[in-house]
Amino acid sequence: MKRIAASRKIFNATSSVQLSELKTTYRNLMKEWHPDKFRESDEKLAEAEAVSKSIIEAYHFLVSISPETHAANAAEYTQLTSAAPIEDYDYKNQVLKIIFQNGAVYEYFGVPKSIFNKMGSAATLPRFARRHIFHSYTYREVSKSNVSE
């Protein structure tokens, strides 16, 4: 959740920001902070490099968790979460990472420790995840599957 808040703060964006607005803000910020705008002798060059890197990372992150991105990939996500077996999962700082057997990796943000603990003791992991994780938390795709359909 901290990463979501930090990324939104960079763009001064709300949770309902449209991708077109995000893209416009991204372009304006990059025009202002692009390292090529500064000379090597300029002391602001190092700052511009750091700021532009954080702008790029925040932009890609916000695009990945956007409702528009989720809507565009809904069919693929639904098929994956309803059919692909879970290979492994990891939990750190309210971020649950689920690795599917086909190689796809997703992160779910804001997952309480209690849900993670229940997940570990669930009789059937896929059913628990379908009921309590997959459509309940903000998520993003970290990497695609290794298997082409």
Image (tube, rainbow, N blue to C red):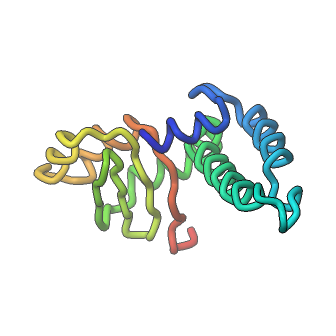
Q: Quadrant of the C terminus?
A: bottom right
Q: Specify whether 139 is left or right of 56.
A: left
- Find residue 35 and report its horizontal and vertical position in percent: 81, 59
- Find residue 25 and report its horizontal and vertical position in percent: 77, 36
- Find residue 39 and report its horizontal and vertical position in percent: 88, 63
- Find residue 127 and report its horizontal and vertical position in percent: 25, 47
Does residue 4 lie above or below 39 as drawn?
above
Residue 46: name its quadrant.
bottom right
Does residue 15 lie above or below 131 as drawn?
above
Decide which of 80, 144 is in the foreground and name it: 144
Residue appearing at x 51%, y 74% in the figure: 146
Does residue 95 lie above or below 137 as drawn?
below
Residue appearing at x 60%, y 38% in the figure: 66
Q: Quadrant of the N terminus?
A: top left
Residue appearing at x 40%, y 43% in the figure: 109
Residue appearing at x 29%, y 60% in the figure: 89
Q: Specify whether 124 is left or right of 80.
A: left
Decide which of 79, 25 is in the foreground and name it: 25
Question: How many numbered marks appear?
Answer: 0
Q: Specify whether 63 is left or right of 89.
A: right
